[in-house]
Image (cartoon, grey):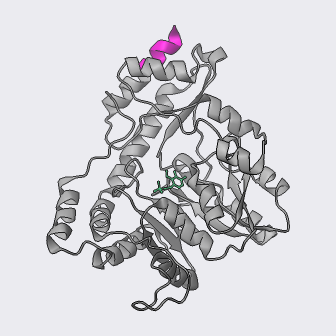
């Protein structure tokens, strides 16, 4: 079976974790501090604050500046944490449609939904493709908004040759096992602002600058040294993992080019895609099968696939109940037709060729 993710650790990563286990230093300690430094250096950020997962990485970013009732522009086509953490920090997510080409936040729709209560925008570098950073920054300047870039799926993605982690105000990452880089559960928030760095460290640990002295309300979002040790070891192979994903992504693009009814992913101009996911849109009329039928055919032929995401956030029952019914046509079309194909770092050229062959076979019928 050609799976959709490879979540195995290397011997070096396992050894790094075991060394920490042997040391008895299980809680947040020197490994976390070093991982923060190593990660910040890798992405070119001034500061990096580790936390327990990508969800908390978002929460501590929003909690730095949101006031009750502040509105935040969120793409509807993303994982739910992007929006729920706005609410956790007291804000209101305003779901925007996405661009039909890039599947990333549509700034025209965002502009139409901007009010005098809008305080921030959360561009998500979905699937490892990169939002047009210049356009988002110009938009945020125009409307005086903070930017929280959700890079949970975009470790190593670049814009104009610069890592997306280096663009401030806040850039958040996840190290969940299926991500481009993984430690089990883990997250990181990068920022170029010194005061935010200090505040996020307090939020992460019960608002406690010194032992049992609490100056603000906070949480326990500490990363363990075991996870951080895995992260430090894995950072060393991240460039190779990314190179493999890119090779696989480009091979899929070339191999699947020109098939009727199959829309391939685009890469934002000036960006280097990180290929967290390689998603296609399946149009039954042109392709002959719909998305679910193609997924079933792939499964029969030992190829995994997945649906990211089967509905937009605005369609999620919880948000329909909270905010009522809305329609965002591009997001809804994606939710109905999108399918993720295997692209991960554990696949060889031969594996990718097999994926292409199976799809070409059924498309030809
Ligand atoms: C876009 C996006 N944001 C946030 C998260 C949350 O990360 P975590 O699962 O580590 O909490 C994810 C994880 O799937 C994600 O894909």
Q: Is residue 362 magenta?
A: yes
Magenta span: predominant SS is helix
Whether residue 11 is visible here, answered yes or no, is yes
Residue 157 against residue 343 in the figure, above or below: below
Residue range of the region highlighted in magenta in the rendering? 358-365
At 45% from the left edge and 30% from the top edge, which residue is drawn? Answer: 305
Q: With 303 as the anchor, is 311 left or right in this view?
A: right
Q: Residue at x 50, y 69 (%)?
A: 189
Q: Residue furthest left?
A: 22
Q: Quadrant of residue 347?
A: top left
Which corner quadrant holds the N terminus?
A: top left
- Which residue is nearer to you in this view: 215 or 42? 215
Percent of width and height locating residue 29? 30, 78
Quarter location, residue 358: top left
Q: Residue at x 80, y 51 (%)?
A: 108
Residue 169 visible, this orientation = no
Q: List x then y, in percent, for residue 303.
A: 38, 25
- Residue 349 in percent (x, y) is at 33, 33
> From the viewer's perspective, is residue 125 above or below residue 202?
above
Nearest the eye: 251 or 2: 2
Give whichever of 120, 316 is nearer the camera.
316
Using residue 250 as the reference point, say whether residue 196 is left or right of it.
right
x then y, percent, for residue 258? 57, 23
From this viewpoint, which residue is outermost toward the top? 365
Relative to 204, is 230 above or below? above
Task: Tally the marks.
Answer: 0
| In magenta segment, residue 103 | no
């Amino acid at each position: 079976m050609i799976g959709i993710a490879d979540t195995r650790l290397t011997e070096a990563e396992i050894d790094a974790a075991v060394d920490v286990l042997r040391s008895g230093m299980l809680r947040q300690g020197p490994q976390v501090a070093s991982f923060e430094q190593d990660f910040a250096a890798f992405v070119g950020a001034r500061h990096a604050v580790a936390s327990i997962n990508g969800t908390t990485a978002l929460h501590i970013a929003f909690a730095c500046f949101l006031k009750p009732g502040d509105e935040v522009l969120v793409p509807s086509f993303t994982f739910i944490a992007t929006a729920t953490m706005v609410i956790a920090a007291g804000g209101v997510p305003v779901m925007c449609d996405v661009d039909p080409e890039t599947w990333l936040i549509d700034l025209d729709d965002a502009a139409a939904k901007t009010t005098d209560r809008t305080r921030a925008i959360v561009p998500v570098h979905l699937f490892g493709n990169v939002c047009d950073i210049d356009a988002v920054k110009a938009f945020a300047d125009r409307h005086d908004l903070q930017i929280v870039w959700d890079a949970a799926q975009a470790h190593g993605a670049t814009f104009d040759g610069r890592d997306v982690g280096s663009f401030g105000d806040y850039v958040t990452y996840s190290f969940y096992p299926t991500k481009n880089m993984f430690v089990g559960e883990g997250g990181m928030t990068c920022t170029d602002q010194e005061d935010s760095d200090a505040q996020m460290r307090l939020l992460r640990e019960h608002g406690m600058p010194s032992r049992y002295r609490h100056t603000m309300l906070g949480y326990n979002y500490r990363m363990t040294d075991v996870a951080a040790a895995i992260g430090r070891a894995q950072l060393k192979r991240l460039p190779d993992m990314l190179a493999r994903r890119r090779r696989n992504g480009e091979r899929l693009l070339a191999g699947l080019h020109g098939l009727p009814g199959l829309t391939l992913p685009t890469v934002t101009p000036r960006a280097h895609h990180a290929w967290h996911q390689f998603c296609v849109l399946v149009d039954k009329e042109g392709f002959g099968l719909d998305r679910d039928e193609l997924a079933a055919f792939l499964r029969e032929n030992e190829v995994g696939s997945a649906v990211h995401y089967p509905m937009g956030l605005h369609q999620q029952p919880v948000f329909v109940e909270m905010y009522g019914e809305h329609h965002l046509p591009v997001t809804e079309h994606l939710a109905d037709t999108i399918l993720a194909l295997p692209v991960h770092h554990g696949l060889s050229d031969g594996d990718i060729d097999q994926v292409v062959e199976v799809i070409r076979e059924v498309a030809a019928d």
